[in-house]
Image (spheres, helix red, strand yellow):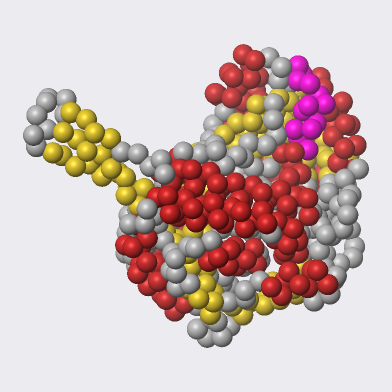
Amino acid sequence: MGGEPNEARVVAEVPKGLLVAGQWMDASDGATLDVLDPSTGETLCAVADATPEDGRRALDAAAGAQKEFAATAPRARADMLMAAFDLLHERIDDLALLMTLEMGKPLAEARGEIAYAAEFFRHFAEEAVRIEGGYQTAPAGGSRFLITKQPVGPALLITPWNFPMAMGTRKIGPAIAAGCTSIIKPAQQTPLSMLALGEILREAGVPDGVVNILPTTRPGELTEPLLRSGVIRKLSFTGSTAVGRVLLAQSAEQVLRTSMELGGNAGFVVFEDADIDEAVAGAMAAKMRNTGEACTAANRIFVQRSVIEEFGDRLAKAMSELPVGRGVEEGVRVGPLIDEAAREKVQTLVDDAVAGGARVLTGGTAPDGPGYFYPPTVLTGVPASAKMGSEEIFGPVAPLTPFDTEDEVVEAVNDTEYGLVNYVFTNDLRRGLRVAEALESGMVGLNQGVVSNPAAPFGGVKASGLGREGGRTGIEEFLETKYVGIAM
């Protein structure tokens, strides 16, 4: 691979095998998959490509470790997570560089993700020792109710490529805290961060078989037998709604507990009484985090007609000034998209909007040269019929649409099958609360462009998913409630 010696070193140091029963091993058929640098299109390295047979080995390992791990003292599980928290911070520079190389995001954002990822371990270390039950008298008297919580059992955790470390720790943290073993299938585009995390968890004292990691180019062949096995008792998936629907159907056969964090189509609403500087800053955060490759990204930006010109000009200026390049380069704020297919999709959506009457304020055309780069783009006057109004853009494109009334914009924002997050900017407190309650989404950012926080319940409604990750709710997703009736 090309690049500086430090880049070669961090890639060389990552385990390249499958983690099964605490050991790094090759795929059963010896197959490997290539990991590419999206800023150059060049191969960084190859890692083991798991087969269905490897899935069975991991399933045996997770099942074999479950009983003993469930009996582990909560404090011991918390200590494992805190040890991993410390190791993530000790190695933050190397882990950030590794993430930037395989995923493309700028180093500053990658460092931020490692810190964010570590925080899930600290949060769930604290939750591990606070798993509560209850004891009460039956309403009619006589008997007593004893309520206790137990781990749900072995879990299948499927993570996406856009936040390759944090989406792993957000699932692994509560699984370990609750006493569940797991099999993790990272995205094939970005397996290196998860493999590095696997080694950290081993060093942190997580017992063999508790966490198993299987990169693969054959996700369906690998995961379907696991879901139908009767051994896996929990599925946590972050990814597209289309894949989520397939996994839900497969999970139904064994009546599995499921957590689904699926697609989004976030509305970002700017009322005329908003602080425009604050709204522009919020839009930059909601749109450009992760180069726009986030399910929480502002996908539809609605601006009250009286301020849309001012807002659009300020946003376009801010977007046009963002340096684009390889994420490892100093000062870069916008990295490449994950692959050529992603870039082609973004360009197709922009061309469709422009054909429908939208006007380009900045950007709008993919550059020539290596890597999968796309310029920060602002479109104004985007018609309701534009495809980007119903499809996730997953790129650095901000489409602006005018509106006139509160009722009109609430209806427009809710006019989607998705309901992950929406954003509202207004200085009218009553309006802000009124609109936040009326919006059909699991989360709302009120005068802020970022809602993700390990201590808050993250998740959506409608086609954006089921269940919540993070917060107190996150560990409940990995626990069963047991009631014992006691005769007195």
Quarter of the figure that contains the N terminus: bottom right
Horizontal arrangement in the rendering, residue 449 relative to residue 180 (left or right): right
Query: Where 162 sits versus 429, above or below?
Result: below
Please tell me which residue is depicted at 73% across the width and 62% down the height of the picture.
Answer: 94
Please tell me which residue is depicted at 63% across the width and 36% down the height of the picture.
Answer: 451
Residue 454 position by quadrant: top right
Q: Is residue 288 magenta?
A: no
Q: Is residue 279 magenta?
A: yes
Front residue of 272 and 170:
170
Residue 239 position by quadrant: bottom right
Horizontal arrangement in the rendering, residue 249 relative to residue 14 (left or right): left
Please tell me which residue is depicted at 62% across the width and 58% down the height of the picture.
Answer: 87
Percent across and percent down for residue 211 are 47, 64
- Read off the magenta span: 272-284
Percent across and percent down for residue 215 are 57, 70
Horizontal arrangement in the rendering, residue 232 relative to residue 8 (left or right): left
Residue 373 position by quadrant: bottom right
Please tell me which residue is depicted at 79% across the width and 54% down the height of the picture.
Answer: 106
Quarter of the figure that contains the C terminus: top left
Percent across and percent down for residue 411 are 60, 27
Q: Residue furthest bottom?
A: 29
